[in-house]
Image: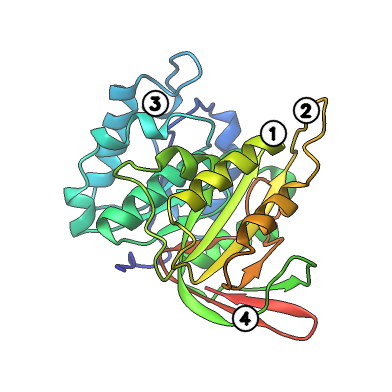
């Protein structure tokens, strides 16, 4: 796996909107965070374009991001928000210049499309982390933003995780891949599909029906994604819904049930996903999972 250069004081970070539209007010706190951290911030008026729910149509969004990928002065591209739309532009992008001068692509949720596509096809690491839409003046120096800045600078990431009844003990060191479960499910069979062989798979999700969590897990298992998996890291499965006739299991129970035929280590409640304490993960880079007597330590 190729790891982009870690950032130094004075480096430039661009803000992009590959999916849903964003306003200048919504990135103000994030811009302040980057400047206080010693970085230059780049964007232009194209960032605030609108086309229904999107930040411009597909050609427009792809054109702006292509310019950022090709610009050698930009050392990281921080996606402003998720929503939906990255999959509509990923095949329009030319990663030739990016592969010659890799830079960090940063975000989560819908940005899983970029993580999966880049990790799989170009073997370049990316950064799963909080986004500008989540950064507010009152949480400017939260654990989420601190882990983002630390990850960009190349500092070690170490997270203690409390015990969970569905955890399965086992120590493992392997590259971590994955992201939003719904996005991974939608990418199955495409050129952006993940290769889980010898990897730790990270999953998280938000605002899904429990039966759909089960359907997605069934499909991932039927596609052989657990056959040679080194480990499973389960982030937050937030704000789940149920039908009038209950499904009968929580989202965590559904995931644990699908893991029973396998023996890889499992860690639940990793602090990443759609929650305020969304810790950074360097996707494609080795992650070390160590089970202790009362907690788990994760290093990345």
Within 10 Å of disc 4 (Cα), the crowding (few <14, some 14-19, many 20+) is some
The circle on residue 209 is: 1
Towards the viewer: 67 or 282: 282
Q: Is residue 116 above or below residue 59?
A: below
The local crowd at label 2, few if under 14, some if 14 to 19, many if 20 or more residues have their Cα within 10 Å, is few
Q: Choose top left, top right, bottom left or bottom right for residue 256.
A: bottom right
Residue 107: image x %, image y %?
50, 48
Residue 243, label in figure: 2
Query: Is the residue under label 3 in contact with that under label 4 (CB below 8 Å)?
Result: no
Residue 115 in the figure: left or right of residue 122: right
Gap between marks 3 and 2 measured at Cα: 43 Å
Query: Do we see residue 61 in this rendering?
Result: yes
Residue shown at 54% from the left, 40% from the top:
182
Residue depicted at 38% across the width and 46% down the height:
114
Q: Earlier in the sequence, mark 4 or mark 3?
A: 3
Q: Which residue is mark 3?
A: 45
Residue 205 is left or right of residue 194, and the answer is: right
Q: Secondary structure at mark 3?
A: helix
Q: Residue furthest front?
A: 261
Of the image marks 3 and 2, the number of the one nearer the N terminus: 3
Q: Are marks 2 and 4 in contact (CB under 8 Å)?
A: no
Distance CA(mark 4)–CA(mark 3): 49 Å
Which residue is disc 4 drawn over?
A: 170
Cα gap from disc 2 to disc 4, whole angstroms: 36 Å
Q: Are marks 1 and 2 in contact (CB under 8 Å)?
A: yes
Ranked by sequence position, the earlier of labels 1 and 4 is: 4
Chain-order first, disc 2 or disc 4: 4
Specify few, some or many for label 3: CA neighbours under 10 Å numbering under 14, 14-19, or 20 or more.
few
């Amino acid at each position: 796996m190729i790891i982009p250069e870690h950032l130094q004081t004075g480096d430039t970070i661009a803000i992009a909107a590959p999916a849903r539209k964003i306003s200048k007010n919504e990135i103000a706190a994030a811009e302040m965070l980057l400047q206080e951290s010693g970085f230059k911030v780049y964007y232009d008026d194209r960032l605030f374009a609108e086309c229904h729910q999107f930040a411009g149509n597909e050609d427009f969004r792809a054109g702006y991001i292509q310019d950022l990928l090709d610009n050698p002065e930009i050392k990281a591209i921080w996606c402003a928000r998720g929503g939906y739309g990255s999959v509509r532009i990923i095949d329009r992008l030319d990663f030739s210049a990016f592969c010659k001068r890799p830079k960090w692509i940063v975000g989560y949720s819908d940005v899983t499309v970029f993580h999966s596509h880049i990790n799989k096809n170009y073997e370049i690491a990316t950064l799963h982390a909080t986004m500008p839409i989540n950064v507010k003046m009152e949480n400017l120096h939260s654990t989420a933003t601190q882990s983002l800045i630390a990850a960009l600078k190349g500092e070690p990431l170490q997270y203690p995780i409390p015990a969970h009844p569905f955890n399965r003990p086992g120590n493992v060191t392997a590259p971590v891949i994955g992201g939003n479960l719904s996005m991974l499910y939608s990418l199955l069979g495409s050129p952006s599909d993940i290769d889980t062989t010898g990897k730790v798979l990270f999953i998280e999700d938000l605002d899904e029906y429990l039966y759909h969590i089960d359907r997605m897990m069934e499909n991932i298992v039927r596609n052989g994604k657990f056959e040679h998996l080194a480990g499973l890291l389960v982030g937050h499965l937030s704000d789940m819904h149920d039908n009038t006739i209950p499904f009968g299991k929580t989202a965590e129970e559904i995931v644990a049930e699908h893991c029973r035929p396998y023996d890889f280590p499992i860690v639940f409640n990793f602090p990443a996903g759609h929650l305020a304490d969304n810790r950074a993960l360097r996707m494609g880079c080795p992650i070390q999972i160590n089970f202790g007597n009362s907690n788990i330590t994760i290093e990345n």
